[in-house]
Amino acid sequence: MTLSPSSSRRWVLIVDDDPDMLNLLTEFVHGPEMKVTTATDALSAFIQARDLRPALVISDMQMPGFYGAATLTELRKDPRTSMPFIFVTGMGLEKAQALVPPGTPGVRFLAKPVDWDKLERYVFELTGMKIGPDSNL
């Protein structure tokens, strides 16, 4: 499948190795302003983000292969792939934050279980996009 960034809606890449979490996040985020693409590991996420250049990446921190923070670091080496990230993680927030260089712009962290209101605020804050068809931000 070829993904094209040219669309009236913008792409959001959601990355998680847990299929249930991936489905929950996809259903929550998908809406009139956003198309969702998914990956189940950090390497696939890197490839999709590099090729598609989504408006936002929502990623688990711990996945097969390497941490989501490594994906962020690699993508930030190229100014064309400096999209914002929201890490949704089951590890402690302090531990997750320690994996990302201090002062890295456009990065937010959420603990699992997900605070859906906070996720909605972070998406809007980082992209200006509203989540879902009935968002009232």
Image (cartoon, rainbow, N blue to C red):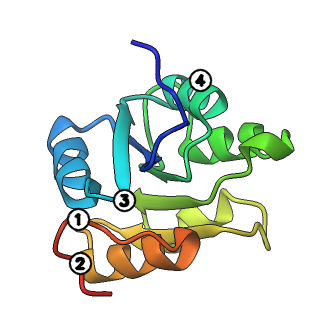
Left or right: residue 60 versus residue 74 is left
The answer to whether marks 4 and 3 mark residues whose Cβ atoms lie closer than 8 Å is no
Q: Earlier in the sequence, mark 2 or mark 3?
A: 3
Name the spot of residue 133 as percent of width and height, x first.
19, 66
Mark 2 crowd level (few <14, some 14–19, many ≥20, 10 Å Cα): few
Q: Earlier in the sequence, mark 4 or mark 3?
A: 3
Disc 2, SS: loop
At 64% from the left and 39% from the top, the residue drawn is: 71
Q: CA distance from mark 1 to mark 4?
A: 26 Å
Name the spot of residue 84 as percent of width and height, x first.
62, 59
Residue positioned most to the front: 8
Q: Which mark is residue 135?
A: 2
Q: CA distance from mark 4 to mark 2?
A: 30 Å
Q: Earlier in the sequence, mark 1 or mark 3?
A: 3
Name the spot of residue 123 as percent of width and height, x first.
44, 70
Q: CA distance from mark 4 to mark 3?
A: 23 Å
The answer to whether marks 1 and 4 mark residues whose Cβ atoms lie closer than 8 Å is no
Q: Residue type at mark 3: give it.
A: Glu
The answer to whether marks 2 and 1 mark residues whose Cβ atoms lie closer than 8 Å is yes
Q: Which mark is residue 132?
A: 1
Disc 4, SS: helix
Q: Residue type at mark 4: give it.
A: Ile
Q: Which mark is residue 101?
A: none
Name the residue carrying label 3. 33
Q: Which mark is residue 47?
A: 4
